[in-house]
Image (cartoon, rainbow, N blue to C red):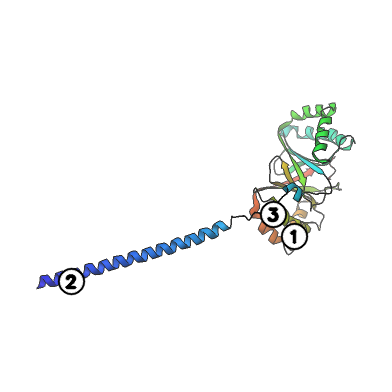
Amino acid sequence: MATRVLQSVGNGLNQARNRVRANGQVIVAIRGLSASNNRNREDSWFKSLFVRKVDPRKDAHSHLLAKKEDNNLYKIQFHNVKPECLDAYNKLCEDVLPSIHSDPQYSCELVGTWNTWYGEQDQAVHLWRYRGGYPALTDVMSKLRQNKEFMDYRKERGKMLLSRRNQLLLEFSFWNEPVPRAGPNIYELRTYQLRPGTMIEWGNYWARAIRYRQENDEAVGGFFSQIGNLYMVHHLWAYKDLQSREDTRNAAWQHEGWDEVVYYTVPLIQHMESRIMIPLKTSPLK
């Protein structure tokens, strides 16, 4: 009798345990499906943040963003100078570059020439404008190769440099064209390496943003690269001093809409750099 009772109780416990196990498996399965669905929804939402809707275009970025009323091409040069040669390098540039700038046979203009004050040290930056685009650049370089003074300058300059690089740039249509200005000023060159495919988006935001940064006449020029490092943007600003720079930049945040521009353009940037530069005596941008 007792044995039958124990067997009955044991069978009941086994059935209950099996039901609990089965129910647990169903619950786990349901939870697994629910978690999977949630993950799928989350993955879909997360991926949607990075899916760019391509706006079909039938023209190059350079035609959409650059000024159409002129055909200017810009060249920016970065020369890293041996520290002990910087003064001699500056003197050499002051002796030669203005003569090229003022000679009518060369369809180019020296926009500005600087030494970096804060940023990369012992560095010179030169910005040239070629009126007439690539043909003007080709013509100028061809003529300079026949110019003994310039070739001697290049030979002497080579002894003073650690490295050099350049870029060819176009000017954003919504920026002012750089023109000579009186000094004394300091200049800030802000350089942005954008993610590929975002140049149009950058231009759309800055076409609205530039009006917030012109009240103190600080906007000098805005450019984007065509040859050299690509998807690179350079903004050139002028200030009386570092405190003026700080005050002017802070004032931009008082304008409704500036915060939105910053919010939407920051994700377009891969890398950014700021140089504070001092103009040389012969720079048209003083």
- Looking at the image, the residue that sits furthest to the right is 104
Q: Are marks 1 and 2 in contact (CB under 8 Å)?
A: no
Residue 84: give x, y in percent of width and height: 73, 32
Specify whether 192 is left or right of 216.
Answer: left
Task: Measure the alpha-carbon separation of dots 3 and 1.
Answer: 21 Å
| Residue nearest the viewer, comparing 77 with 277 | 77
Task: Measure the alpha-carbon separation of dots 2 and 3.
Answer: 75 Å
Specify whether 28 is left or right of 112.
Answer: left
| Residue nearest the viewer, comparing 229 with 240 | 229
Mark 1 vs mark 2: in front: 2
Residue 235: give x, y in percent of width and height: 75, 49
Residue 134: give x, y in percent of width and height: 79, 38
User: Residue at image x 33%, y 66%?
Assistant: 24
Q: Which mark is residue 201?
A: 3
Q: Is residue 269 above or below residue 91?
A: below
Mark 3 vs mark 1: in front: 3
- Disc with the residue nearer the chain's start (3 vs 1): 3
Task: Measure the alpha-carbon separation of dots 1 and 2.
Answer: 81 Å
Q: Which mark is residue 9?
A: 2
From this viewpoint, is residue 224 visible? Answer: yes
Residue type highlighted by circle 2: Val
From this viewpoint, is residue 247 visible? Answer: no
Q: Is residue 168 above or below residue 150?
A: below
Quarter holding residue 260: bottom right
Quarter holding residue 116: top right
Q: Count neighbours of disc 2 (C-alpha within 10 A) and say few if under 14, some if 14 to 19, many if 20 or more.
A: few
| Residue nearest the viewer, comparing 251 with 165 | 165
Callout 1: SS: helix
Q: Count neighbours of disc 1 (C-alpha within 10 A) and say few if under 14, some if 14 to 19, many if 20 or more.
A: some
User: Residue at image x 66%, y 54%?
Assistant: 266
Q: Which mark is residue 252?
A: 1
